[in-house]
Image: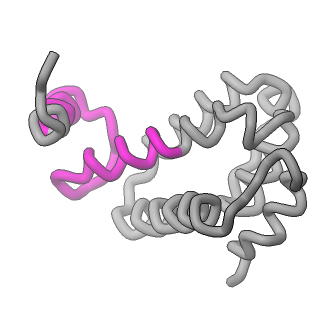
Amino acid sequence: MNKNIEEVFYSLNEFDEKFNVFNCDENNYTIFYNAMISGLTQLILCKKLFKRNKDIVEFLDKVFNIKYPDYVNKNRALILGRTIRYVSEIDDSESLKAIINKLYEVISKLNNDNYNPDNLSWHDAIKLLDLNRG
């Protein structure tokens, strides 16, 4: 399957228009939702970065102010599913952009600051990220 990325995003946008998957009131925001969901999925499923579900819960709370009930926090798949649903229900383009910017900042810092999950606990990494500023 050799589709280029533009065709894939065009198809996803058409799908969203047809089935109204995302709640954003502005057109052509499907690419933002898909990028954000993809990035969050990679982060949440990364066992090297988040060894325990407790680390994911702390990350989502500190960085995105997302909280879930205890029964959700015990299952990585439920955390991922609820996070995707949370993202897909964002209906304000400014809120969507703010979350994307935070996600980009997290990924950039992890890539550029030589974060080594073998030598640093996630609690220490959150402190290094310093994303919880007002």
Is residue 13 in view?
no
Res. 113 image quadrant: bottom right
Q: Which residue: 65% across, 37% down? A: 44
Q: Is residue 93 above or below residue 72?
A: below
Q: For this view, does 105 lie left or right of residue 2?
A: right
Q: Which residue: 18% across, 28% down? A: 15
Res. 114 image quadrant: bottom right
Q: Is residue 55 above or below residue 127?
A: above
Q: For this view, does 84 lie left or right of residue 51?
A: left
Look at the image and give the residue range highlighted in magenta. Answer: 10-39
Q: Which residue: 21% across, 58% down? A: 26
Residue sticking out furthest to the top: 1
Q: Which residue: 78% across, 23% down? A: 75
In the rendered view of the protein, which quadrant contains the C terminus? bottom right
Q: Main secondary structure of the magenta part?
A: helix
Query: Along the line of sight, which residue is nearer the eye, 91 or 111?
Result: 111
Q: For this view, does 95 lie left or right of residue 63?
A: left
Residue 63 location (% of width, % of height): 69, 62
In the rendered view of the protein, which quadrant contains the N terminus? top left
Residue 96 location (% of width, % of height): 42, 60
Display coloring: one colour
Q: Is residue 32 magenta?
A: yes
Q: Is residue 17 above or below residue 81?
A: below
Query: Along the line of sight, which residue is nearer the eye, 101 or 116?
Result: 116
Residue 8 location (% of width, % of height): 17, 32
Query: Along the line of sight, which residue is nearer the eye, 17 or 78?
Result: 78
